[in-house]
Image (spheres, helix red, strand yellow):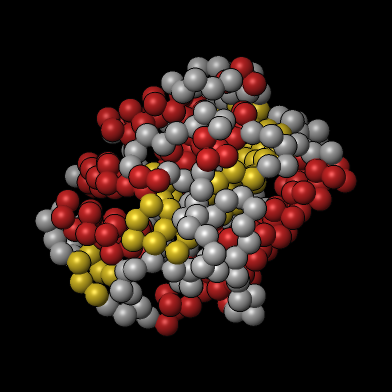
Amino acid sequence: MKLLEKELYKNDIKYITSLDLPWNKIENKTILISGASGMIGSCMIDALMSKNINIKVIALGRNEKKAKERFNEYWNSNNFTFVQCDINEPIKEIGNINFIVHAASNTHPRQYSLDPIGTVTTNIIGTNNLLNYAASHEVERFVFASSVEVYGENRGDTEKFNEDYCGYIDCNSLRAGYPESKRAGEALCQAFIKQKGLDIVIPRLSRTYGPTMLMSDSKAIAQFIKKGVSKEDIVLKSEGTQFYSYSYVVDAVTALLTILLKGECGEAYNIADDNSDIALKDLAKIIAEFVEKKVIFELPDETEAAGYSKATKAVLDSRKLQTLGWKAKYDIKNGLHRTIQILNDINL
């Protein structure tokens, strides 16, 4: 995937690197990123490798072949190292690291359904392994990428979730593996802050999309985007009344970097923007109209349905993050259009 050859994506990376952030904090430092080949990890790596301040990136992933294809531009750079690693196993010696961004996780419904054990263990055992490595190597800051899913279902007592909200999750279900393990991962972070003295910040991501998404992604928005790129009708597997917060991947990465460089230890920060809060049916309509197709309704199969979120309204309040100076660049319409344009260009 030659994303970095595409003008729109190159402009996205330039935008990230041009932000007025205290980049000096990571200048001449080493940053380890787990989930390196994923949607958010790969975009962050593109930005860090494009920032001319001598940042060394260690990319953790399970598949070296896929990583080499994705990061071919950097593969032989002295500032880039790929380490093949299953974080559910103890982390082998990699050397001294200044910062860790833990972005590895099963993040879409089909994975939740087909690999529920891996979903839970990556968020708990994998997080514990990386935290232990951080503690034993005096890492300056650890970023645990959490999720809107930790809030569960809106109890009907708030319009938006702030960082103190705690909704309902039916823990006795297959689908609970993801949100409950993210909650446990956050609790582990607080334990390591208290017991090991680690400096940890916790971004809580809204539903994220963008041109770095994996083609295996089974989230509804990813399915819509793939249909749009293929110039097919958009298939909606519900009435589409679910109302969620979304983030274009570039905005998610700028938020993660803002939290990494400016957040306070122990704090969680919601990543969202009012201009990207939307009902699923309206999101599908934006894509359908952009590619001149229509929205059709279809029931999900049993495997898909088992992995779907039961939350009908999950909208994040991001005022806390905004106090750090962050703001989104793209609203939902522009972000979706941009994603489809970039992916179309790649597929030409």
Residue 29 sits above or below residue 131 on the image: above
Residue 83's image quarter?
A: top right
Q: Position of residue 62 (x, y in %)?
A: 58, 52
Q: Where is residue 211 drawn, in percent x and y? A: 35, 45
The residue drawn where x is 42% and y is 75% is 304
Q: Is residue 313 left or right of residue 8?
A: right
Residue farthest to the left, as pictured: 292
Image point (50%, 51%), residue name: 316
Q: Is 246 above or below relative to 112?
A: above
Residue depicted at x 43% and y 77%: 305
Q: Residue 146 vs residue 271: left or right?
A: right
The image quadrant of residue 100 is top right
- In the image, what residue occupies the spot 25% across and 69% down? 235
Which of 256/66 is in front?
Answer: 256
Residue 38 appears in the figure: no
Q: Hey, which residue is sitting farthest bottom in the picture?
A: 302
